[in-house]
Image: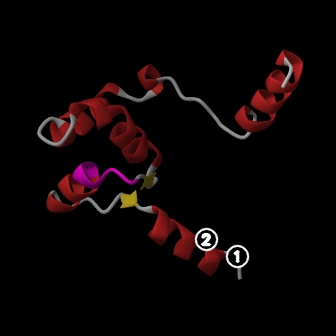
């Protein structure tokens, strides 16, 4: 594959994504996310902060994160099985 073909494919894929700088998430939400994640996996803090800030779900296969958030009463994670079911129900 040529470099121009690779660049084209990259643009085709990336134009469907919106990248958000973690610094654009309010500090109080980032702090809350860190307090939630510090004993699960602090590297997941930006994802949890974004989900909290956007009132959105996290699509993940990270069992440690999913179980840790569930233990804390946060049902903000969806695995692929649940995401597939959700999409099927909402395409009707």
Q: Residue 37 sits in which quadrant? A: top left
Which residue: 26% across, 38% down?
33
The residue that label 2 is drawn on is 87
Which residue: 22% across, 50% down?
64
Question: Which element carries disc 2, helix, strand or loop?
Answer: helix
Query: On the picture, is 91 further left or further right than 31?
Result: right
Task: Find residue 23 and report its horizontal and vertical position in percent.
Answer: 43, 20
**Depth check, front residue: 43 or 21:** 43
Classify the position of the C terminus by image quarter.
Answer: bottom right
Mark pair 1, 2: CA separation = 6 Å
Question: Which element carries disc 1, helix, strand or loop?
Answer: loop
**Depth check, front residue: 2 or 51:** 2
Which residue: 19% across, 43% down?
36
In the rendered structure, which segment of residues is drawn in magenta? 61-65
Q: Residues within 10 Å of mark 2 (few under 14, many from 20)?
A: few
Q: Residue furthest left?
A: 39
- Give the image's coloring scheme: secondary structure
Task: Find residue 66 and report its horizontal and vertical position in percent.
Answer: 28, 56
Tell me: residue 8, above or below residue 87: above
Task: Find residue 80 and report its horizontal and vertical position in percent.
Answer: 48, 63
Number of on-image labels: 2
Q: Residue furthest top?
A: 3
Q: Main secondary structure of the magenta part?
A: helix
Tell me if residue 63 is in the magenta stretch. Answer: yes
Tell me if residue 75 is in the magenta stretch. Answer: no
The residue that label 1 is drawn on is 91
Q: Are marks 1 and 2 in contact (CB under 8 Å)?
A: yes
Which residue: 84% across, 25% down?
1
Q: Residue 32 sits in which quadrant? A: top left
């Amino acid at each position: 594959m040529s470099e121009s073909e690779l660049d084209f494919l990259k643009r085709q894929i990336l134009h469907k994504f919106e990248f958000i700088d973690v610094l654009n998430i309010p500090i109080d939400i980032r702090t809350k996310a860190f307090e939630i994640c510090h004993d699960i996996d602090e590297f997941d803090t930006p994802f949890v902060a974004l989900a909290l800030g956007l009132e959105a779900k996290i699509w993940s296969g990270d069992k440690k994160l999913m179980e840790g958030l569930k233990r804390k009463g946060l049902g903000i994670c969806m695995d692929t099985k649940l995401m597939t079911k959700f999409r099927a129900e909402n395409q009707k």
